[in-house]
Amino acid sequence: MNWFEHPVFIERVAFLDQSQYWSGERHADYQLFALRHLTAQAMNVPFYRRMMDKEHLGPESIRSLVDLRRFPIIDKKTVQGNMALFLAEGADRNLLLNRTTGGSTGTPLTIWFDGDFHPRNKAITEHYMRVFGLDIFSWRSVRLYGDRIAPEILAEGRYWYVVENRKLVMSCYHIRRESAAAYVAELNMFRPRYIHTRPSSILPLAKYVLEDGLRVNPIRTIVCDGEYLTDGQRRIIEQAFQARLFNVFGHTEACAAGHPCPHSDALHFIPEVGILELLDERGNEVTEPGGRGELVVTGFDNPIMPLIRYRTGDIGYLGEQECRCGRHYKILASIEGRIQDYVIDSAGNPTPLAPAVFNYNDMDWSGIREFKVIQERAGELTIQIAPEAAWAADADSAKAILASRIGGILAGFRIVVEIVDDIPRSAIGKHRYLDQRLDVKDKVSFR
């Protein structure tokens, strides 16, 4: 069964469409109901059951949304170091699905889920695409993301292929000044209604379009996700493609989803997906528009591996809580925590790294505790990995597997893998996944 025919998908889309204009009070009532249900589910998860037994906490204790704060805040390291404790008892990993997230800190985390999770999660995408006025099932579209192109297609001088006569899948790894005109010609011939992409994937093409005066037939709508987007980058993309850009917030953990609307670029966070807290450095909720805090999320959609008060590591700014669209959602004016990064190939061309290392369709970080990518010379990447114990026992195999995985995506780079005990951190306890030691400002002048 295709995911869009799944009863869970159909029911979920209908529910999100119907509930989007509820009053704030009704959204709060739903979240309280969902939090109680989540608390009951969490009783099957060893980490939460131990905590709730100790604190004498249960579903009947959740009398208001304020009671969410009785749960401790957790982060990726907490889950990663206690994976077995975060899986629902009785869950057989052999029967579950999973995907791995890296995040800008370079700490991979595998998320486990059941067969209903995927259609439930896809329903969120269908819902916000409807908000943007897009039809994902019949309209022609472009996916310019992190997909690999088969060698036989590349041998023909093409960097794309078509799926079901309506989706043009294009490589973001072969966009160069000398290939930009071919990309534009293919776009003009295909005539898509919208593009789905990452900011770092489409920015190089937008730059070449403007600098070289290439003519792109207006595409009208571009949907971006996965990365931080500056106002200057938005202007470049919108000008190049004569489009409105909708930048969406989502994450592999699937605890929160935020989307703009036809009236605003601010992110409207869907209450039915989970609870979003924006906490300042003291752990207090940010309440004044313009206030800055970290996104801490509680997801309703994954009973196999529920995450309650999970630190995303993303920093956001609270927006005005009224929008002309009429949705009574928590609104963030912007998020600053996702910065896209580029590496430079041997010919001096900028290549987006995030689509390669964080694309869970092609890249698998299982077995790796932490990683960092270092670039000191064009065309060469050094990847430091701190493996899990099982991998560390056979360091040569671990290095070969990882080099093969990422080398198959970034085929134009020489990949060197180093095994390390730990990845050094900054004074505030964080590290970036890319240590770019080349001066790339002139090559990546998108701001």
Image (tube, helix red, strand yellow):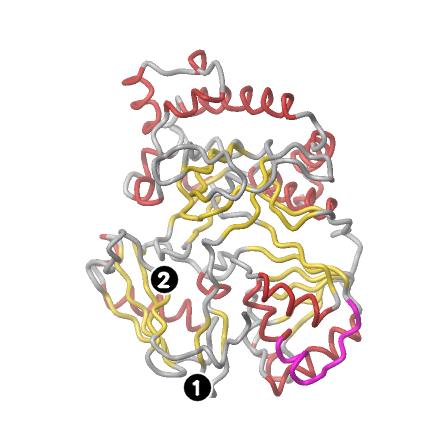
Horizontal side of 285 relative to 417 (left or right) equals right
Relative to 308, say whether 263 is above or below. Answer: below
Mark number for residue 433?
2
User: Where does the N terminus fall, quadrant-wise?
Assistant: top right
How much space separates mark 1 and mark 2, taking CA atoms? Answer: 21 Å
Q: Nearer the viewer, residue 316 or 374?
A: 316
Q: At which x and y percent is residue 34?
A: 54, 23
**Helix or strand or loop: what does disc 1 sit on?**
loop
Horizontal side of 349 relative to 436 (left or right) equals right
**Helix or strand or loop: what does disc 2 sit on?**
loop
Q: Are marks 1 and 2 in contact (CB under 8 Å)?
A: no
Relative to 438, say whether 277 is above or below. Answer: above
Q: At which x and y percent is residue 272?
A: 60, 31
Q: How many discs mark residues in the rendered view? A: 2
> Going 52% across and 76% down the picture, which residue do you hit?
445
Q: At which x and y percent is residue 295?
A: 45, 42
Which range is magenta? 207-218
The quadrant where residue 208 appears:
bottom right
> Going 51% across and 32% down the picture, which residue do you hit?
275
Mark nearer the N terminus (1 vs 2): 1
Mark number for residue 346?
1
Q: Amino acid at mark 1?
A: Ser
Q: Amino acid at mark 2?
A: Tyr
The quadrant where residue 423 appears:
bottom left
Relative to 419, say whether 82 is above or below. Answer: above
Residue 64 included in the magenta stretch of the image: no
Q: Bin the neighbour count of mark 1 within 10 Å (Cα to Cα): few under 14, some 14-19, many 20 and up.
A: few
Mark number for residue 286?
none
